[in-house]
Image (cartoon, rainbow, N blue to C red):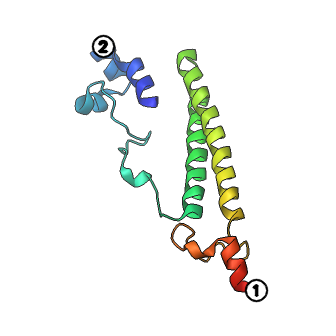
Amino acid sequence: MIGAIVYQLTRNLSIDEIKRNGFDTYFVDHTTGVYPVAASGSPFTAAYLQSKGDVITDLHEDLAAEQKARTTYDNILRLVDDPDVREPIKFLREREIVHYQRFGEGLQLATDKLDSKNFYAFNPSFDKHCLKSVCNKKMK
């Protein structure tokens, strides 16, 4: 979505506008095509996608990612006045909040099924024997 917005804002720039707005180094490499980079200029990499195969770890990572995206949208909204940019960003921000809430609910559901005294001591995605009912029977 952000890439599409950037493309819409830059696709018809003249060479003078590109130079005047500091877009010239990007233009040299990508013309006005979409090339996902951070505001710092670091290109997107799959390293940003975190997965450990542990439901608790991965849900915490998902929660953090949603909050980081929301913060980015907050920062964009602080900088931009154009309603054609603000409205989709506001929608995306709201979506991140809902995702955060759903991942939180998923984390609660996952931990409810585990032995609450020990759910950080194993990987529930792998160590299937540690569901509450099984662990409780073993502890008795």
Left or right: 18 in relation to 92: left
Q: Position of residue 76 (x, y in %)?
A: 56, 31
* Callout in the foreground (1, 2): 1
- The residue under label 1 is which amino acid type? Lys
Q: Please name the residue shown 37% across and 45% down the image.
A: 44
Q: Position of residue 125 (x, y in %)?
A: 53, 66
Q: Position of residue 41 (x, y in %)?
A: 38, 41
Q: Are marks 1 and 2 in contact (CB under 8 Å)?
A: no
Q: Please name the residue shown 33% across and 34% down the image.
A: 35
Quarter holding residue 3: top left
Dot 2: few (<14), some (14–19), or many (≥20) neighbours within 10 Å? few
Dot 1: few (<14), some (14–19), or many (≥20) neighbours within 10 Å? few
Name the element at disc 1: loop
Extreme residue in the left direction: 28
Q: Which residue is mark 1?
A: 140
Q: Which residue is mark 2?
A: 14
Does 45 sit above or below residue 97?
below
- The residue under label 2 is which amino acid type? Ser
Quarter holding residue 136: bottom right
Give the Cα separation between the discs numbered 1 and 2. Answer: 75 Å
Q: Please name the residue shown 62% across and 75% down the image.
A: 130
Q: Please name the residue shown 53% across and 21% down the image.
A: 85
Left or right: 98 in relation to 26: right
Q: Looking at the figure, which quarter contains the C terminus?
A: bottom right
Does 10 sit above or below residue 60?
above
Nearest the eye: 140 or 53: 140
Nearest the eye: 102 or 28: 102
Left or right: 131 in relation to 123: right
